[in-house]
Every structure is written in structure tokens, then in C-alpha cells.
Amino acid sequence: MISSEAGSKVVLFDFDGTIAATIEAGVEIFNTIAREHGFVEITKENIPALRAKGAREAAHELHIPSLMLPIVVNKIRNGIKSRIPELAIVSGIKEAIVSLKKNGWELGIVTSNSKENILAFLKHNDFEIFDYINAGSSIFYKASAIRKIISENNLSDRKIVFVGDEIRDVIAAKKNNITAIGVTWGINSRAGFEKENADFIVDTVEELTKILSDFCEVGA
């Protein structure tokens, strides 16, 4: 149960694909890397299958050696950095998050993207309203990043929701015993979230807003 008491509601967001529309740019950057290193490129043909897979499964499908993953992630981060001015916010998400803030939710971002990129994007889009940011974590250690943001900000007694576009976001939320909401407008599909038993799966920002609004009403 998520209380409506002021200050008791915390919603943490993933960044890439959830708030920032970085998927198209990320695919372009990855495919450049793939051609350089001989990985399988992301195409219209393999996207449906990849969207139902977790990060490790997708990396295997794309023939990315485990030791190369940190290098690939770093190159994508650097590529995204150069594109910050042209990246869009996912349609409707800014307005939804601003409304959450006005309704007493505390806001956070937990992401494997760099803090430099996050702060630049938020500043460029006049969106500097987040209370907590944990950035730059390994793509396979998001659970630890969530745990750290909870510990450092004394949030253990709060009711917390984590919103993300990847299967690993759901896994990380569940490891921390917080509500997991998977959004299908980013990397992973509904089928992928269903495999990990996400608490909620939403296809639109309106659905996300409705779920969080219902939480506000519980215990009011």
C-alpha cells in the first residue's frame, strides 16, 4: 500500500528509454560499434526478439563478448553525450512527472548512463526537479544502485515505485522489495516484463499516471 501522506511517496525512474527518447540514437551508435567489432547489428528483423530478452540474453544474441560489454556501454554513453541537445523527452512524461511533484511525490533517477549526461539533459530541457540521482552504475548492478539511493537518502520507511523500460529494471526493483512498473515505449516489450512478473506494465504515459494516481488515493 502506498500512502498519500506528503513525503511518503517516492517514484524512481530509469532514464534512457523511460524519460529520454534515446533508443533510436542508442541503436545508431551501437550499430556503428557493431560494424567496427563484428557484432550482430540491431535491425527491424531482430528487434522484436531482442525486446523480449534481458540484457545478458540480448548481448549474447548480438555476439557481444562479456569482456566487451563495459567498453560498448562506455562508447554508447559518450555517443549519447554528443547528442544531448537533439534528444527529445518521451512524449507526455515531463508533464506527468511535474504533476507527480506537485502532488507530493519525491522524484529520483537511477540509471547506468553518466551523471554528466543526465544533468546536461535535464538542464537543456528545463527539467531539474529531481530530488535524487544515482547515475553511472554498471548495467548489471542497478539493484545495488537502488539500494544505495534508498540508504543514502533514508528512504527505507517510504513506499517506493521504480519505473523502467527494461527487464533488468523490474528485477532490480524486486530485489529491493519495491513496486516495479515496466513501460513498453522503451527497450523491452510486454512479453519481457511478463516473464519477470512486473507489478504493472503500461503502454502509455496516461496509464502510468493513472496507476500512480490510484496509489495516491489508497490510504488517503
Image (cartoon, rainbow, N blue to C red):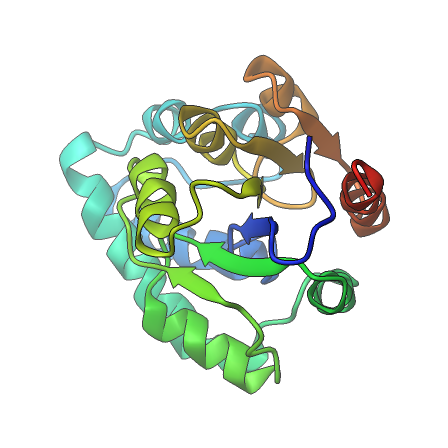
In the figure, 98 relative to 170: above or below?
below
- The image quadrant that residue 80 belongs to is bottom left
In the rendering, at what x and y percent does residue 155 appear? 44, 48
Residue 190 in the image, given as x and y percentages of width and height: 69, 26
Which quadrant: the N terminus? Answer: top right
| Count of marks, rendered view | 0
Q: Nearer the viewer, residue 1 or 112?
A: 1
Q: Position of residue 154 (x, y in %)?
A: 38, 51
Q: Residue at x 80, y 36 (%)?
A: 218
Q: Residue at x 38, y 43 (%)?
A: 146
Left-right relation of 165 to 175: right
Image quadrant holding the C terminus, namely: top right
Q: Position of residue 163 (x, y in %)?
A: 60, 43
190 left or right of 187? right
Extreme residue in the left direction: 67
What residue appears at the point 50 percent right and 67 percent down from the top-left corner?
A: 131
- Hey, which quadrant is residue 6 in on the image? bottom right
Q: Residue at x 23, y 41 (%)?
A: 69
Q: With respect to residue 206, does 107 lie above or below?
A: below
